[in-house]
Image (cartoon, rainbow, N blue to C red):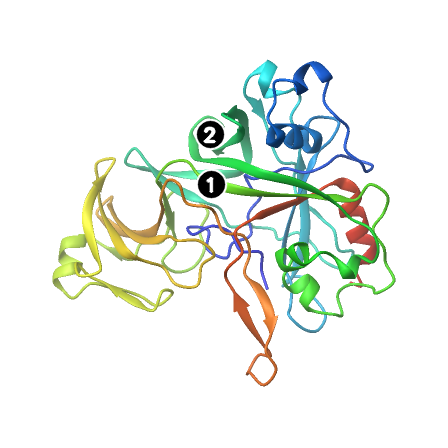
């Protein structure tokens, strides 16, 4: 079971642009008192987790729902980041992720990681997955995800409803929201030692992330590529031609998209089909898109401004079913760990 990312990097493993967490060695350290008076409760929590020397830990994984993970197939790794100064006094700050490091002794980091791609001003931009900038907007925290050029903003989200949750007791008996966030890691009883406990200062941050603008992602129709020319749906044709021929079938969505369940509009000068029905089996509402670019038709998704971004699909035991579980898509929060929590998790792993 993989960590689930946003549409356009569907069920992908990417270094998150939502990096927030707590610092090396354990408990949170507060920013200078002079800064605190001007900050909202959410911004104070953000700085307690993210302001250097503290750092954020984002975990990515693909783990089996049963049995033992296999190197080369499964993985579990972390990347972390911090800001150097408070955005309230120093302006926008970089929040750039470190190269990924495996948490599991028996597993390695994949040699190639899927990337997010975005339609911006008539062109496809590749998201960096690790380059971000952060500033404050109202009482919230605005995080801009940057393209590989380190300049172009490909996505903007607002963090709110931040809460810091201390961890104690058995690692395998984590709070339900944390256990559901990690899905297979906690569903598969063979992956965590029953005797391991959370170390001193272990803590996680839980928050809501909201899309600030309509965001159009682009993805491969088949296979996996990493550049700004994803695999098209069809080459040498137009959306109008495909619609006239009966529409475009999406096996992933189990839907044929036509002018009955969508419409054709112009997005930044690009002829674009946007579905009027949400895509199935996602943790947030997203709409299938098709783009007419470079003489080809490409596919992707639209996440509308104001959308609360979903978290991870998690497994719920369902005895008597073929797999023994069902999938729950209701999660609408994000979680990041601090260094003490990551160290505790590492110690608790059985693989």
Residue found farthest to the left:
244
Q: Is residue 230 toward the left or the right of residue 340 in the image?
A: left
Q: Is residue 70 visible in the rendered structure shown here?
A: no
First in sequence: mark 2 vs mark 1: 2
The x and y percentages for residue 317 are 62, 74
Is label 2 in a helix, a strand or a loop?
Answer: loop
Q: Which residue is rendered at x = 68% and y = 50% of the image?
A: 77
Q: Is residue 286 visible in the rendered structure shown here?
A: yes
Q: Which residue is rendered at x = 72% and y = 58% of the image?
A: 107
The x and y percentages for residue 55 are 71, 33
Residue assigned mark 2:
149
Q: In which quarter of the image is the N terminus?
A: bottom right
Where on the picture, by quarter, is residue 262?
A: bottom left
Residue assigned mark 1:
210
C-alpha gap between disc 2 and disc 1: 24 Å
Where on the picture, by quarter, is residue 340?
A: top right
The residue lying toward the viewer, choosing from 198 and 111, is: 198
The x and y percentages for residue 351 are 78, 63
């Amino acid at each position: 079971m993989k960590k689930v990312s946003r549409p356009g990097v569907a069920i992908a493993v990417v270094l998150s642009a939502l990096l927030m967490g707590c610092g090396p060695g354990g408990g949170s350290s507060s920013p200078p008192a002079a800064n605190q008076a001007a900050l909202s409760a959410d911004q104070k929590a953000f700085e307690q987790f993210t302001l250097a020397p503290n750092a954020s830990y984002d975990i990515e994984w693909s783990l089996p729902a049963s049995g033992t993970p296999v190197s080369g197939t499964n993985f579990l790794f972390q990347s972390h980041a911090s800001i150097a100064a408070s955005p309230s006094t120093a302006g926008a700050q970089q929040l750039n992720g470190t190269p990924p490091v495996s948490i599991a002794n028996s597993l390695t980091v994949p040699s190639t990681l899927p990337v997010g791609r975005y339609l911006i001003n008539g062109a496809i931009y590749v998201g960096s997955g690790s380059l971000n900038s952060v500033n404050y907007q109202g009482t919230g925290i605005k995080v801009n995800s940057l393209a590989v050029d380190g300049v172009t903003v490909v996505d903007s989200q607002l963090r709110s409803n931040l809460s810091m949750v201390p961890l104690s007791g058995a690692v395998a008996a984590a709070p339900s929201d944390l256990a559901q966030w990690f899905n297979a890691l906690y569903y598969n009883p063979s992956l965590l030692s029953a005797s391991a406990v959370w170390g001193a200062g272990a803590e996680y941050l839980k928050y809501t992330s909201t899309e600030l603008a309509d965001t159009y992602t682009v993805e491969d129709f088949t296979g996996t590529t990493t550049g700004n020319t994803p695999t098209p749906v069809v080459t040498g044709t137009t959306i109008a031609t495909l619609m006239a021929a009966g529409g475009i079938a999406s096996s992933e969505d189990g839907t044929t998209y036509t002018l009955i369940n969508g419409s054709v509009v112009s997005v930044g000068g690009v002829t674009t089909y946007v579905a009027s029905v949400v895509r199935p089996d996602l943790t947030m509402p997203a709409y299938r898109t098709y783009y007419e670019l470079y003489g080809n038709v490409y596919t992707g998704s639209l996440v509308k401004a104001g959308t609360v971004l979903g978290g991870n699909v998690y497994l719920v035991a369902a005895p008597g079913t073929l797999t023994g579980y069902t999938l729950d898509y209701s999660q609408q929060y994000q979680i990041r760990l601090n260094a003490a929590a990551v160290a505790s998790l590492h110690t608790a792993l059985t693989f």
